[in-house]
Amino acid sequence: MSQTSSPGPARMQKTSIATVCLAGTLEEKMRAAAEAGFDGIEVFEPDLVASPLSPEQVRDLAEELGLTLDLYQPFRDLEGVPEEQFQQNLRRLEAKFQLMRRLGVDLLLLCSNVGTATSWEDPVAVEQLRRAADLAAGYGIRIAYEALAWGRFVNTYEHAWSLVQQADRPNLGVCLDSFHILSRRGDVSGFREIPGDKVFFVQMADAPIMLMDVLSWSRHHRNFPGEGGFDLVTFMRELYATGYTGPVSLEVFSDVYRQTESVRTAREAMRSLQWLDDAQAGDTPAHPTGWDFAEVRAAEPSDLSEVLTQLGFADRGRHRTKDVHLFSAGAARVVTNDRTEAPLEHAGGSVIASVGLQVPDPRATAEHARALHFPKAWRANRADEMVLRGVQAPDGTEVFLAPTSADAPQWVGEYGERDAAPGGDVPGGDGLILGIDHVNLAQPWQWFEEGVLFYRSLFGLAAQVSNDVASPQGLVRSEVMRTPDGAVRIPLNLIPHGLDPGRSSDTRSVSGHVDHSELRLKAAYPQHVAFLATDAVEVARRARARGLRMLPVPSNYYEDLAARFGLDEGFLAELREHDVMYDRDEGGEFLHFYTRTVGTVFFEVVERRGGYEGYGAGSAPVRLAAQYDLDRQ
Amino acid sequence: MSQTSSPGPARMQKTSIATVCLAGTLEEKMRAAAEAGFDGIEVFEPDLVASPLSPEQVRDLAEELGLTLDLYQPFRDLEGVPEEQFQQNLRRLEAKFQLMRRLGVDLLLLCSNVGTATSWEDPVAVEQLRRAADLAAGYGIRIAYEALAWGRFVNTYEHAWSLVQQADRPNLGVCLDSFHILSRRGDVSGFREIPGDKVFFVQMADAPIMLMDVLSWSRHHRNFPGEGGFDLVTFMRELYATGYTGPVSLEVFSDVYRQTESVRTAREAMRSLQWLDDAQAGDTPAHPTGWDFAEVRAAEPSDLSEVLTQLGFADRGRHRTKDVHLFSAGAARVVTNDRTEAPLEHAGGSVIASVGLQVPDPRATAEHARALHFPKAWRANRADEMVLRGVQAPDGTEVFLAPTSADAPQWVGEYGERDAAPGGDVPGGDGLILGIDHVNLAQPWQWFEEGVLFYRSLFGLAAQVSNDVASPQGLVRSEVMRTPDGAVRIPLNLIPHGLDPGRSSDTRSVSGHVDHSELRLKAAYPQHVAFLATDAVEVARRARARGLRMLPVPSNYYEDLAARFGLDEGFLAELREHDVMYDRDEGGEFLHFYTRTVGTVFFEVVERRGGYEGYGAGSAPVRLAAQYDLDRQ
């Protein structure tokens, strides 16, 4: 990332990561950081204290791994205290300077006082910071002073900078931490007041927007840039405007990443900085323009064929060389497997194994995926078959890349007895089904954040505010990733812990290729493909005539609907007759119905009237209850 | 619980539970509530809407199950709105009255307006509440008005009561919800202003004390009375002082209970009301007075024997008839298995299978356990052997009950070649080990709350503030349950999700007896027995001379200790030499060391100097890292 082309936007010069971001021992953390390509690390004191490695061994290991030790952290509760206490603090500080000398670290993170300052006068703190800096100078050490969001008296970077400025020592500067600043909705335009060479260190973390005490939020729910809701792009631009050229480091306290495999986490961390650096430079990926296909694997493929045919899909035949089958309706294409897959059969489920996205330049997207170190999705192809570039999403879903096209893609010609005419008259769907509206993917808890960054960094999809859906087996957190125009929408559903099959951390593959355990995880929870129709009721009517068994919608739902919206009775009766659900908001109306599940995969048909942009408020809990109920019959 | 003895304290007359507390379908929830002995339920509207049962079928099912339908809930955003909107709201309300008539429910929960009231005048709301009540009267329906903690304008019960009083209708009263009141630190002494017959309904929930927005706190983290940190005892006393004799209902929104087996959850819910009713009546259990024994099962029992012997424990021999062995040191008694247990071997772990607690009256405690429906712990005994009464804790640990005694218990005589002399000269421990200090139990996430209520309701143990401990494999939430005098201390450690082996909800046994899967869950995480010693360093010295391999403490730990406490160098060298850890607080000092693990069980020796009441701040992460490190070698 150390690009130095001069006229373009500023770029990250050096990457770093705090050891606290990663699981495992200090040595494992260091090896993972090096493996992921970080330039340096922050040594988090509790990791060192718990390590059997001596400071000298840590220093040697870093050198061997090509890592710089950029920062020692944290030192707490130094300043703004009575003189006698400060004397003790200086002794404590000097012990750390000696330790840092052995480590070969020359920068200390000093957090603003939380615990021991009971009354406060800026001049006292300034004088004490100055004395600490002078002591540090004797060791060749610099001090980066950081305002914790929950600091007792100093809790904004502006205040910290003011004290540093007054203390006026060359080896005293500030540390800017995106969490501490943005969690308090700080104004980053104030960075401009700080000369870049007085910014001694920068720590980046993202976080979901939550309303809780900022300490707990910080200790449990930070995540990597691009995984959360902070505006880190503006943060970086304002930072670079100061002239800062030092390391950009990650400091993420996360309940999830603390218990997931460190090499994989380190890669994700590096990727988050790559995304951030590109995003702040205005280098954002081209959005996908639409869906190419969705591929479903089921333990009982014939059940899939039946449901799709009943929905009006045309059977486009078997692939020339592979055990897969194509069904189409309008621009909606669904590929199904033709034989039972043993591992899925074992899981008793089915799975959305891959999706195809149309992008303006598949080669460029594939290269971007490689630059971000997302593993390649790989399918054996014969020489005369179209090669689809693909990339593997964190949950194991393979995402294939096709060129943007209004016509049927070339690969469709590989299906069927005779050559299909590419483009032209695509049969299926009774002219009622237009294409794929959205694909809803189940996410094991270990991979949810990575999924968000995957779709954001590679495809520029934005996360909408997440919401919780009650199911009979637990709350499901759902977050929709989508393009601004809605051409591609991917709701990611976080599977409740109770449905997590097996000790999942073991199955978090580092190798990069889909393994059965990953598919097994996904197969444990319902996923679906939703098709956009011009008339959902008519699709339902015809599908039923062809024998489709809808997911039954309880009568109570329609009574509640009547109470909520005061719908026309004839319309309500029609919805009820066909198990079609309904929602309305300021934007417009939404009609949709679900098929029964095949294993754990099902289909939905949606009709969007006016500017309705949602997914049917209140219908997901009813749907989940009905699926659960059928499962148990 | 419907005891009506007149002169004693007020008692709960009727129990109820909101269907939202339980997982599953509406029918499953109702059956679970009936099975657990609840008198009635609250019908939570989303559960009805998602149910295939018609209102009439729900009514009939309730009758069949002997449940009353006490409340329909919630109705939202009625009052304090412009007239036109209110007219619409009345139509929406009337539709619900018609539904309630079909259900046979005559009480509606009305929540204070959150979404649609944009300006507020009390008289407008009063008039609208009055008109709603008058409409309800025509249906024979009563309305219980509840101030939500996050209500836009009405968010205290005092305000709700003021509006109800002014509206002055016989079928309009208030609902008191412990969460909405106590989450805002409301003063329950104000209940006295409300006549008991104007309290139409009472909803109880406990919750851990957290600092987060009250809506998220309420929706995710409520738990059952006795599992959290609210003062519900005072709440109940003040409630009864109003003369209220209606149902006491549970309304718990919990991420955990939403995904655990409903019959077991309903039992836990009922137990929480039993505890609460006893506690408010001043009927609290006698505290245990000390430890009788701890029993450890390991895949390699000979390793256990070796470690205990090295610690100075005397081998008291094999049990006359069972494959178990007794070791003792002072009053510390450890029973080990003599043969490899297959399921544990499979799990690769070991487990604290049971503990013995001394209580003033074992028979009374056993009867109390039966009244609370805790499953009995059962061991086959010969006629001439002492019968230990026992009860099974939620995590599967068996807790046996012995009479309080300063002497060695009678059952000790069942061990060894010859009859052991009960009391008298108990060998072992070199006179340095006094007894068991604490037993640290790993808790799978599904059972943590139940564990808290178990030790609180049956033994009167109180929960101390929980804290999070960083381990290389995730954060561990730890909460200490203890007697006021510290005679019995049981830290409960919540296992990180990532270490949860298998789909755990399946293993949550309803049957009541320990099954292998429960042991397997526990065996996945370190647990330990800590012994209290007069001189931890001396115990360590002698143990090492006998060949004990301590858990190694990193040198960095001692350097940090030196920086923190400025300890005498000789003392520090002694600690370091024997891998003894150290802590100090206002109360006193703490010295302790750990043995290496046998499977997943290990031992600790602690020395408490002065009034030190903790467990060694900062040592747990170091210990967990060292254990993890050894595990991977």
Image (cartoon, coloured by chain):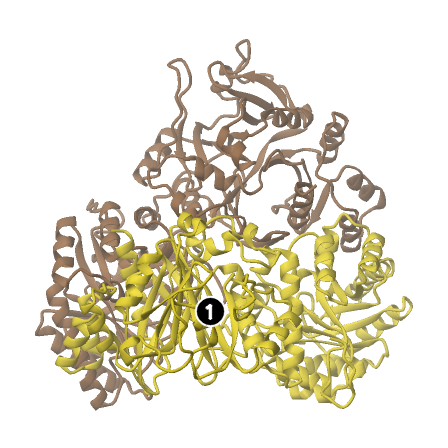
Chain colours: A brown, B yellow
Q: Quadrant of the C terminus of chain A?
A: top right
Specify the quadrant of the image occupied by residue A173.
Answer: bottom left
Give above or below for B468 relative to B472: below
Q: Which residue is mark 1?
A: B355
Q: Residue pushed farthest left?
A: A138
| Residue B479 seen in the figure | no
Give above or below for A147 relative to B378: below
Looking at the picture, which amino acid does disc 1 mark?
Answer: Val
Tell me the residue at 14%/65% (across/down): A106
Task: Find residue A342 and report its horizontal and vertical position in percent.
Answer: 50, 29
Task: Find residue A293 and report its horizontal and vertical position in percent.
Answer: 52, 29
> A161 or B396, which lies in front?
B396
Q: Residue pushed farthest front?
A: B418
Binning the other alpha carbons within 10 Å of mark 1 as few (below 14), some (14 to 19) or many (20 upward) gives many
Q: Residue pushed farthest top?
A: A418
| Residue B103 seen in the figure | yes
